[in-house]
Image: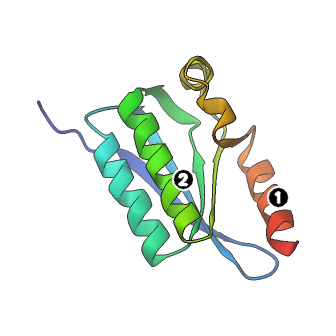
Amino acid sequence: MEQKAIQMEQKTYTTQDGTAVVILQPSGRLDITTAWQFRLKLQDCIVKQSNHIVVNLGQVNFIDSSGLTSLVAGMRDADKFRGSFRICDVHPEAKLVFEVTMMDSVFEIFETEEEALEGLSRNLEN
């Protein structure tokens, strides 16, 4: 099977208390051909940059079980490092997969990136 590279934007947001949050925005498909790269990127960010991650799925129009598995693994890694893992702006076509698999009740999912970051700032302050 041909390996495809996943396109991904990365930026860092700093909360009012100075905590760094890595925001990853993959685009295209998060499936068996790209999930492993995404998983490695998540792991690398959590270990080397910040244990607080926001994944913006606004540009991901397809996600399969491999993609969901990489997200679960990222959430577990963030949890292991006492961080946070949030998902936002889920593309309508990908949202159905979260609902059918009931993963929408497993992840913290926000409508917008701003809401995910806002809530995170409040959680870290408490």
Q: How many marks?
A: 2
Q: Is residue 30 visible from the viewing direction of this image?
A: no
- Where residue 69 appears, as percent x and y from the top left, is 42, 39
Quarter of the image where one finds residue 58: top right
Judging from the image, what secondary structure is the residue with disc 1 in? helix
* Identity, as a three-letter code, of the amino acid under mark 1: Glu
Is 51 situated above or below 115?
below
Is residue 118 shown left or right of residue 86? right
Q: Is residue 88 visible from the viewing direction of this image?
A: yes
Residue at the spot 62% in from the left edge and 70% down from the top edge: 82
Of all residues, the one furthest to the bottom in this rendering is: 18
Quarter of the image where one finds residue 52: bottom right
Which residue lies under the disc numbered 1? 118
* Identity, as a three-letter code, of the amino acid under mark 2: Met
Question: Quarter holding the N terminus?
Answer: top left
Q: CA distance from mark 1 to mark 2?
A: 19 Å
